């Protein structure tokens, strides 16, 4: 028999003032799995989280935990009885309680057992030496660790996290995310993380559910969602993209870079050929035969440098293309800063391009 999901939502919907903000959302999470609900602000991510937590009611759909119905079809289990932990951007620690008191809050039963659980979790998040301190004496990263320990103390089967790392600086955020992920997986907790940052989703998730206008438009492993986007908007959400315009004729689209396959697209359809800047190649000998040419590189096309910027480990070069006056961006490893006005030839890897019907 297939394993029973730790958390399953089926066709959740929610509307406000006649506008559907959560539209037919279905998710499946297993123990130890991290799923990132990823999308722009206002797409319905946090509302979905609140419905699962039980602090918001859905208009339709059901929620199951370990195969048991906890909300929908006339059933409603109170939030505190759902076995769900919550972490938010605001750590919401109690200022009048010590670190130990915050972590122990909500633990029932034997005091010695509760103290043992507190000490175990604080050791796991590296906060044992702060056990008697108060929140105002801690840094932001330390407060985040205490909030994690408190959320895990009752051994929730499911953890819901709403932008919990956004208040931390970049370098600290990476460390805290990695530590948090290790602790959650060690506990076997199913995690649903809401974020608007693609990098965070790629770093933490076993599965990404990309959300737009209340709907999940694509689900899959980070590699799949990044490398096989469902449409132009999905590709652009993860990185800058270049767009080359074309029209289909005989399942092919003709461009200055050669023909691109457009199988199944009717003749006469306008299409967008999408390629990320790191997949543009510069042909330095200007004859379409770069240092490592392949059959996938296509026809070279000429552009003139408009500007070049050093980005640290790579350089971003913008070209005004001869064939249609459009601007294409190329990411080049290391330092490459040609002067504005320099003509160069570009090639693009056909296997790194996505062809979609043109955006309206």
Image: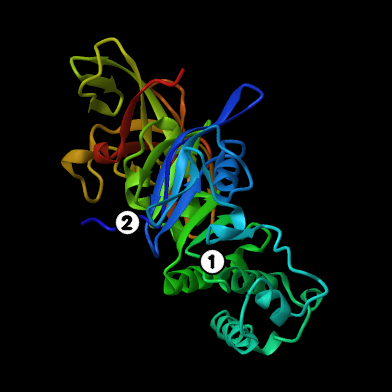
Dot in front, 1 or 2: 2
Pick whichever, 272 or 40, lies toward us. 40
> With 51 as the anchor, is 95 left or right in this view?
right
Tell me the residue at 26%/16% (across/down). 248
Neighbor class of circle 2 (other Cα within 10 Å; few <14, some 14-19, many 20+) is some
Residue at the image point whose x is 36% and y is 38% from the top: 229
Q: Residue 30, image x and y in percent?
A: 37, 58
**Residues at discs 1 and 2 in contact (Cβ within 8 Å):** no
Q: How is the image coloured?
A: rainbow
Residue 230 x, y percent position in the rendering: 35, 34
Mark identifier at residue 132:
none
- Residue named by callout 1: 177
32 displayed left or right of 184:
left
Residue 321 location in percent, x, y?
A: 42, 28
Q: Residues within 10 Å of mark 1 (few under 14, many from 20)?
A: some
Residue depicted at x 71% and y 69%: 140
Residue 241 in view, yes or no? no
> What residue would you read off at disc 2?
4
The answer to which image quadrant residue 218 occupies is top left
The N terminus: image quadrant: bottom left
Farthest top residue in view = 268
Tell me which numbered mark, 1 or 2, is placed earlier along the sequence.
2
Percent of width and height locating residue 87:
61, 60
Quadrant of the image occupied by residue 264: top left
Q: Is residue 358 visible?
A: yes
Q: What element carries label 1?
A: helix
Vertical placement of 326 versus 34: above or below? above
Cα distance in 3D space between marks 1 and 2: 27 Å
Relative to 186, say whether 194 is above or below: above
């Amino acid at each position: 028999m297939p394993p029973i999901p730790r958390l399953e939502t089926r066709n959740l919907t929610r509307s406000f003032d006649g506008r559907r903000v959560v539209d037919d959302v279905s998710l499946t999470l297993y123990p130890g799995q991290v799923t990132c609900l990823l999308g722009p602000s206002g797409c319905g991510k946090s509302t979905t989280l609140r419905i699962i937590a039980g602090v918001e009611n859905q208009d339709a759909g059901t929620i199951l935990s370990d195969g048991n119905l906890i909300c929908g079809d006339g059933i409603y289990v109170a939030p505190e009885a759902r076995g769900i932990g919550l972490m938010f951007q605001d750590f919401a620690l109690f200022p009048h309680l010590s670190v130990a008191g915050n972590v122990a809050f909500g633990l029932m039963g034997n005091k010695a057992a509760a103290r043992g659980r507190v000490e175990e979790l604080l050791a796991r998040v590296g906060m044992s030496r702060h056990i008697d301190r108060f929140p105002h004496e801690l840094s932001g990263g330390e407060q985040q660790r205490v909030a994690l320990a408190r959320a895990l103390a009752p051994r929730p089967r499911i953890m819901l996290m709403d932008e919990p790392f956004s208040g931390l600086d970049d370098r600290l955020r990476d460390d805290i995310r990695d530590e948090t992920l290790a602790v959650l997986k060690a506990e076997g907790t199913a995690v649903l993380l809401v974020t608007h940052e693609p990098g965070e989703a790629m770093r933490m998730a076993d599965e990404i559910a990309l959300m737009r206008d209340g709907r999940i438009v694509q689900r899959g492993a980070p590699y799949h969602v990044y490398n096989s986007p469902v449409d132009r908007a999905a590709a652009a959400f993860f990185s800058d993209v270049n767009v080359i315009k074309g029209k289909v004729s005989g399942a092919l689209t003709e461009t200055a870079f050669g023909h691109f396959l457009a199988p199944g697209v009717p003749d006469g359809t306008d299409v967008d050929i999408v390629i990320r800047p790191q997949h543009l190649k510069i042909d330095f000998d200007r004859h379409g035969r770069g240092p490592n040419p392949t059959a996938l590189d296509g026809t070279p096309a000429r552009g003139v440098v408009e500007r070049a910027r050093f980005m640290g480990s790579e350089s971003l070069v913008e070209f005004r293309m001869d064939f249609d006056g459009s601007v294409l961006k190329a990411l080049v490893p290391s330092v490459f800063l040609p002067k504005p006005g320099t003509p160069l030839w570009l090639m693009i890897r056909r296997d790194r391009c996505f062809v979609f019907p043109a955006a309206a």
